[in-house]
Amino acid sequence: MNAEYVSHMTVRCLDITMEKLFQLNRRVGLTSADTKEEFYGFGSCDVAMLHFNKVGWRRPGLWFRLHDGRVFDVRAIEQKGRDADPAWYDAAMH
């Protein structure tokens, strides 16, 4: 997979989205991290694609695909093996 350029506006939208999701995870006690970058382990500028659908997932979701090919869900859990394969996702932004 070749990562494509992500615009400044897209990075800003990702910043806002990641911050809100981080705060939600913090409020419900799923993390004690101090920042979204600490929680996720990457920054918004590292995101190459967003996915909203995954094979076998029964409801809408959100997965971050990084420029290096790794994929993380909104809970900062890395998807490994076949769960990181682009064929399992509908690409929504690139």
Image (cartoon, rainbow, N blue to C red):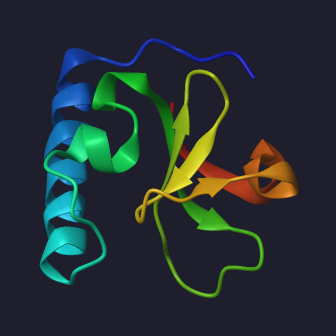
* Front one among 94 and 19: 19
Figure quadrant of the N terminus: top right
Q: Please tell me how many numbered marks the rendered image carries.
A: 0
Location of residue 83 (image quadrant): bottom right
Residue furthest right as drawn: 82
- Quick check: 50 left or right of 56? left
Q: Residue at x 64, y 37 (%)?
A: 70
At which x and y percent is residue 16?
13, 46
Vertical position of residue 70 compared to residue 52: above or below:
above
Is residue 93 something one can see in this rendering? no
For this rendering, which residue is in front, 93 or 36?
A: 36
The image position of residue 69, as x and y in percent, is: 67, 30
Q: Residue at x 16, y 45 (%)?
A: 35
Residue 2 appears left or right of 44: right
Q: Position of residue 82 (x, y in %)?
A: 87, 55
* Residue at image point 51% right, 30% down: 94
**Residue 85 place in picture, x, y as percent:** 81, 46
The reply, left or right, for residue 90 in relation to residue 77 is right
Q: Residue furthest front?
A: 32
Q: Is residue 21 above or below residue 87?
A: below
Q: Quadrant of residue 68?
A: top right
Q: Is residue 75 above or below residue 37?
A: below
Task: Tell me if residue 32 can be seen.
Answer: yes
